[in-house]
């Protein structure tokens, strides 16, 4: 019985996408399907998928460019199985990814989200340890037993203090994601917004420690490009302040206070000051300082 829908919202580098696809094809079991939703116009891509001739793979090319959030929502619309993964088109599944996720889903069938262990790699595919990732591990990620079921205000406060999840590696219960979808007015922080929606609705997150996914981090990402102009942080500030009001009304004062302070987001802006000056000049510097000092 098919259970896992692996969605690959694609745009950008063809070679990295092909590596991502091959990593999915190496998964075990007969309970999954890969669906690629192509939001670009790179030549030869439809022909490459046709050449795979693999019944486990579906390929769609959008009639028009939907953008990041629009393509995420298109993927959710196309998902038909119980669980869905929205994998990055330059990330890699390890051969044991679905083995780990299956076991976690069986242990915690009520969880709306499953976060497995993740390694971070750079553009060259080698391990890549950044300040942001060290901070996630040492300051924000929960300590203690490797397997846990988390939820409620405590988890909301933890993630709003510093989002330690790796969105492309998460396995979601399809029905839960479809209930909310991704906010069209958010272009970078839409994953955290969805998690908050799910937590407010009473859903939970299962964490399992097996490292079975490689998340690629490189400076050419959408979030990095927006950061240097301040767009990312303008969006983040709006989201955090809206969320603070929402959680205050819900009766989650601790999480509301963390969202209103959004300290990690402001500290992140300070770390990007040199890059903002290089890439965006005085406007970039002003944007970083404005966000950092509120």
Image (tube, rainbow, N blue to C red):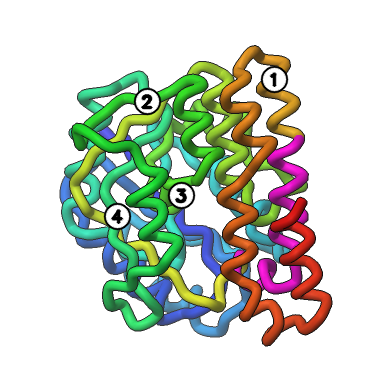
From the image, state whether disc 3 or disc 1 is nearer to you: 1
Q: Which numbered marker is on residue 16?
A: none
Sort mark 2 into few (<14), some (14-19) or many (20+) by Cα contacts within 10 Å.
some
Tell me how far mark 3 sits from mark 1, CA to CA.
26 Å
Tell me how far mark 1 sits from mark 2, CA to CA.
20 Å
Residue in the image at 42% along x and 51% along y:
166
Residue indicated by mark 4:
118
Tell me how far mark 2 sits from mark 4, CA to CA.
18 Å
Residue indicated by mark 2:
150
Tell me how far mark 4 sits from mark 3, CA to CA.
10 Å
The magenta stretch is 223-241
From the image, state whether disc 1 or disc 2 is nearer to you: 1
Asked if one can make out residue 30 in the rendered structure from this viewpoint, the answer is yes
Residue in the image at 49% along x and 79% along y:
13
Residue indicated by mark 3:
167
Tell me how far mark 1 sits from mark 4, CA to CA.
33 Å
48 or 279: nearer the viewer: 279
Q: Is mark 4 on a helix, strand or loop?
A: strand
| Total labels drawn | 4
Q: Is mark 2 on a helix, strand or loop?
A: strand
Tell me how far mark 3 sits from mark 2, CA to CA.
16 Å
């Amino acid at each position: 019985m098919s259970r896992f829908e692996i969605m690959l919202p694609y745009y950008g580098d063809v070679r990295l996408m092909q590596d991502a696809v091959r990593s999915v094809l190496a998964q075990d079991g007969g309970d999954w399907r890969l669906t690629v939703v192509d939001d670009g116009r790179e030549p030869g891509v439809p022909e490459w998928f046709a050449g795979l001739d693999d019944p486990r793979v579906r390929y769609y090319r959008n009639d028009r460019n939907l953008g990041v959030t629009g393509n995420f929502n298109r993927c959710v619309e196309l998902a038909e199985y119980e669980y869905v993964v929205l994998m990055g088109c330059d990330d890699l599944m390890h051969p044991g990814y679905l083995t780990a996720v299956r076991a976690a889903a069986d242990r915690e069938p009520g969880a709306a989200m499953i976060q497995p262990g993740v390694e971070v790699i750079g553009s060259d595919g080698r391990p890549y340890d950044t300040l942001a990732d060290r901070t996630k591990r040492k300051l924000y990620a929960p300590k203690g037993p490797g397997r846990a079921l988390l939820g409620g205000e405590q988890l909301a406060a933890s993630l709003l203090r510093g989002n330690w999840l790796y969105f492309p590696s998460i396995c979601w219960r399809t029905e839960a994601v479809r209930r909310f979808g991704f906010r069209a007015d958010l272009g970078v922080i839409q994953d955290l917004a969805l998690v908050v929606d799910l937590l407010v609705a009473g859903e939970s997150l299962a964490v399992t420690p097996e490292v079975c996914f490689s998340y690629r981090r490189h400076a050419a990402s959408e979030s990095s490009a927006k950061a240097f102009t301040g767009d990312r942080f303008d969006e983040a500030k709006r989201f955090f302040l809206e969320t603070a009001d929402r959680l205050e009304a819900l009766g989650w004062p601790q999480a509301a206070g963390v969202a209103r302070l959004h300290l990690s987001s402001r500290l992140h802006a300070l770390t990007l000051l040199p890059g903002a000056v290089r890439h965006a000049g005085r406007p970039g510097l002003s944007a970083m300082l404005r966000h950092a000092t509120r």
